[in-house]
Image (cartoon, coloured by chain):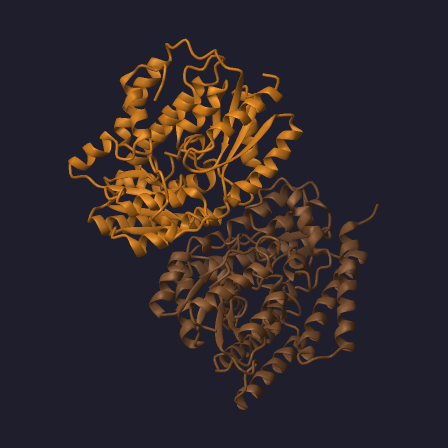
């Protein structure tokens, strides 16, 4: 990745974002340790960490086509599961020792069914994430988390004690705290890190052991604290939408002078904005509370829009945002309606807004560039 | 100020009045089954108009929210998408509505039914309800629609509750959903003042139980070769058990008449078609432009839709012995049995086992997956369906239509595709 950040820490992090099996995973596997892939940022990955396994957030980095998965999915499906499953069929996820899916959306939930039927992975599990964020839903998900814990214990012949769970929760909370520090730096008039670089950093956090990641992140934060920052931009942008794990997409936006200073993305702020309660009595209940009710939700959660738009408005104020880009993977129903509502609300707030549909892998770069350019011009920038 | 919601409801009522008159004056072979369906709709619209004019509480809701409870609570409800579902045959504004939906800033790759519902809300074409019991099952789009309509300027501030459906169908899930239904009752009482009388719920459920039993018997007869069932009344059971006349003895009469018709044909060794050649499973709901398609299938290809997604719902009868059993079984029925919910919710094993069962039990010659553009979970299951059919030795066709918009893939294009398929598979 082209960057002004020179540190080795950033190089290692960006490499992890740009590849599927990065050196940290290779080292982990080389030690005989196991990796469990998971879909969706609502996955309580702390349970996997507590099991002594490496949680790996599924993505299809490097995918170039869907020739194999087109047998199982259709052209009206979102391209993310199609590319992911294509890589799976090619053997690109053979390094995984298990896969945990979630009923995140209609497209992704069927990966579970197709994976079970087509691939030899011995552990393929699906969790039921509620659609609402109330107490009964937290209680339901507590049982789901407990079931996952039991499943991992049985499958990998290990014991996940409360002590290990608390260790994992604290470790992941530390990750989130460090990531928030990174976001805090972006509030500055001259942010020391671009949106492209920041996304690479957060994506990397889903693909390497947290201990190593936290160490790298601390090094990076130290370096950035002395950086003069980026002053060469036309507008400060908030990027919002569904799955986006490719920093190159952000790079196209930033190449036109729009600096992405914050986001509402599930590979971004939605996975780091707050912490799991370390003072709770039951670690599993604490995980359920966090993943269902406390963390910023995405549009799959019904009845939580006010909190979602509230967070966006807070960010617009705190990060001095000039405009919002809403990106959506084509055929995503959740974001299709959410964009409609958000655009109306932001219009009421006099916040310029650009809606962009996209494919999972980079395409239509010229169109994206032109539309961002026009957007910045309409903002008078 | 003109109440557009009331105006539209009156127009729809008048349309059904016209249809009823037409059917009564021009009787034909299945008029006796269609007339009660039209009457049920007419009653519904008349009640809706009356409730609005009298300022009585009215709720917007859906067929999968245990409508027996609404009946038992004496709450009038309407389904925000029923006009879109009815299609051109019962919605004179269909094309205008589709164009209205197209103009919304909602992506056109989202289910047309849901975009139309959003358009109805935004354009003020639905009666303003006292409260909304939303549906957040079985697809992402319906969840997103409800969240968006909650924020619509037309409906903002209207109390909304939606029972949360778990992804599984085990006892834990059923118990959880039963609790959600109880919370729904509390919500309804709070916002309409109506209370649930358990004795009345038992009466209502006993009627729907009987309806579901008769429905099951009709389905049993549809296994016969030749098939005695007519496409024209295919959606009737669904309409009467879950939408109109829910728990109403008048619905029972319809089922008895439909069953009698089928029995008569089976006993005589006859089918609905004189020379049935293709027994077809239409593995989705009927398109709203079905009236263009089904008669053509019968006439041109002697192909009969032996089973479809509206009809294949092996409903669980509700144990009425106690309040607990009723809530438990209503939860089960609405989580696992209901049309579209059954096939789309949860893991693919659910629909996969149905597919195998139907093909075997109903002696199906070919399976048609229409591939409605809004059914993303189904689109992601097409490989599973194809493999199942291959294993069963039954030809499988995936078309690619919009169930609610004949402009997406026109009826003629569908006919052409199906003709090529029948010919290629040697079915004709």
A149 relative to B372, above or below: above
Most distant residue in the left direction: A31
Q: Quadrant of residue A302?
A: top right
Q: Is residue A302 above or below residue B259?
A: above
In the rendered image, is residue B328 in sight?
no
Residue at the extreme bottom: B268
Q: Position of residue B74 (x, y in %)?
A: 69, 64
- The structure residue drawn at horizontal position 52% and vertical position 64%, both measured from the top left corner, is B338
Pick the front one: A299 or B418? B418
* Residue at the (50%, 37%) spot, across then down: A328
Number of numbered discs overlaid on the protein picture: 0
Answer with left or right where residue A225 lies relative to residue A9. Answer: right
> Quadrant where the N terminus of chain B lies?
top right
Which chain gets the brown colouring?
A: B
Q: Position of residue A210 (x, y in %)?
A: 29, 31
Tell me the residue at 41%/72% (across/down). B357
Tell me if A7 is positioned left or right of A193 in this view. left
Question: In the image, residue B52 lies at what x, y percent?
Answer: 78, 56
| Residue A191 percent across, percent down from the top left | 45, 15
- Given residues A13 and B103, the one toward you in this image is B103
**What is the residue that sits farthest to the right in this orientation?**
B1
Which picture quadrant has residue A225? top left
Q: Is residue B20 left or right of residue A278?
A: right
Task: Note the chain letter of the orange one.
Answer: A
């Amino acid at each position: 990745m082209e960057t002004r950040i020179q540190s080795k820490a950033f190089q290692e992090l960006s490499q992890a974002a740009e590849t599927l099996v990065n050196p940290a995973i290779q080292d982990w596997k080389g030690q005989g340790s196991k990796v469990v892939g998971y879909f969706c940022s609502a996955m309580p990955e702390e349970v996997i960490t507590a099991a002594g396994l490496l949680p790996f957030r599924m993505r299809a980095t490097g995918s170039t086509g869907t020739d194999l998965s087109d047998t199982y999915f259709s052209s009206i499906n979102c391209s993310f599961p199609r590319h992911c499953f294509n890589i799976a069929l090619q053997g690109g996820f053979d390094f995984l020792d298990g896969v945990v899916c979630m009923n995140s959306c209609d497209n992704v939930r069927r990966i579970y069914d197709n994976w079970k039927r087509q691939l030899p992975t011995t552990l393929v599990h699906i969790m039921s994430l509620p659609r609402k964020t109330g107490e009964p839903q937290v209680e339901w998900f507590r049982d789901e988390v407990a079931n996952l814990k039991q499943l991992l214990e049985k499958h990998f012949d290990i014991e996940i004690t409360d002590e290990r769970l608390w260790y994992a929760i604290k470790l992941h909370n530390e990750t989130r705290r460090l990531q928030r520090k990174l976001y805090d730096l972006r509030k500055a008039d001259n942010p020391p890190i671009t949106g492209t670089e920041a996304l690479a950093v957060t994506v990397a956090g889903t693909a390497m052991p947290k201990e190593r990641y936290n160490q790298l992140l601390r090094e990076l934060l130290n370096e950035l604290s002395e950086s003069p920052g980026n002053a060469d931009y036309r507008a400060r942008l908030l990027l919002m939408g569904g799955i986006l794990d490719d920093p190159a997409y952000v790079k196209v936006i930033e190449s036109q002078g729009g600096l992405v200073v914050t986001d509402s993305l599930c590979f971004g702020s939605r996975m780091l904005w707050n912490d799991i309660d370390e003072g709770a009595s039951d670690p599993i209940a604490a995980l359920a509370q966090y993943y269902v009710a406390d963390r910023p939700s995405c549009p799959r959660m019904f009845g939580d829009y006010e909190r979602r738009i509230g967070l966006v408005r807070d960010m617009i104020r705190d990060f001095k945002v000039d405009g919002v880009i809403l990106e959506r993977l084509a055929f995503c129903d959740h974001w299709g309606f959410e964009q409609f509502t958000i655009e109306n609300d932001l219009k009421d707030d006099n916040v310029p807004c650009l809606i962009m549909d996209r494919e999972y892998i980079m395409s239509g770069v010229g169109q994206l560039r032109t539309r961002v350019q026009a957007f910045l011009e309409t903002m008078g920038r | 100020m003109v109440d557009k919601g009331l105006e539209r409801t009156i127009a729809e009522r008048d349309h059904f009045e016209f249809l009823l008159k037409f059917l009564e004056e021009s009787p034909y072979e299945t008029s006796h089954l269609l007339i009660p369906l039209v009457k049920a709709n007419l009653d519904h619209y008349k009640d809706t108009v009356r409730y609005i004019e009298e300022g009585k509480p009215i709720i917007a809701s859906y067929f999968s929210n245990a409508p027996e409870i609404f009946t038992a609570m004496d709450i009038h409800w309407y389904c925000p998408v029923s006009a879109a579902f009815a299609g051109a045959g019962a919605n004179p504004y269909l094309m205008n509505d589709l164009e209205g939906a197209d103009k919304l800033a909602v992506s056109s790759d989202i289910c047309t039914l849901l975009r139309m519902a959003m358009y109805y809300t935004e354009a003020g074409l639905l009666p303003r309800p006292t409260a909304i019991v939303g549906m957040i099952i079985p697809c992402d789009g319906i969840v997103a629609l409800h969240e968006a309509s909650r924020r619509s300027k037309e409906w903002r501030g209207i109390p909304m509750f939606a029972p949360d459906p778990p992804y599984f169908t085990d006892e834990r899930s059923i118990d959880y959903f039963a609790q959600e239904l109880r919370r729904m009752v509390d919500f309804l009482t709070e916002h309409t003042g109506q209370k649930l009388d358990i004795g009345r719920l038992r009466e209502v459920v006993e009627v729907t139980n009987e309806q579901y039993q008769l429905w099951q018997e009709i389905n049993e007869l549809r296994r016969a070769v030749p098939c005695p069932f007519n496409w024209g009344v295919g959606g009737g059971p669904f309409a009467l058990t879950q939408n109109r006349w829910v728990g109403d003895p008048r619905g029972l009469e319809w089922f008895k008449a439909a069953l009698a018709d089928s029995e008569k044909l089976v006993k005589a060794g006859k089918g609905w078609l004189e020379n049935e050649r293709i027994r077809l499973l239409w593995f989705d709901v009927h398109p709203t432009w079905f009236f263009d398609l089904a008669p053509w299938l019968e006439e041109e290809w002697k192909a009969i839709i032996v089973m479809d997604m509206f009809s294949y719902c092996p409903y669980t009868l509700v144990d009425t012995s106690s309040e607990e059993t009723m809530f438990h079984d209503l939860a089960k029925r609405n989580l696992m049995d209901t049309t579209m919910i059954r096939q789309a919710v949860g893991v693919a094993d659910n629909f996969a086992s149905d597919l195998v069962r139907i093909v075997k039990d109903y002696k199906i010659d070919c399976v048609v997956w229409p591939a409605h553009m809004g059914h993303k979970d189904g689109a992601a299951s097409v490989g599973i369906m194809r493999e199942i059919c291959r294993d069963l030795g039954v030809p499988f066709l995936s078309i690619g239509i919009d169930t609610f918009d004949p402009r997406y893939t026109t009826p003629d294009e569908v006919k052409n595709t199906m003709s090529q398929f029948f010919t290629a598979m040697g079915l004709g």
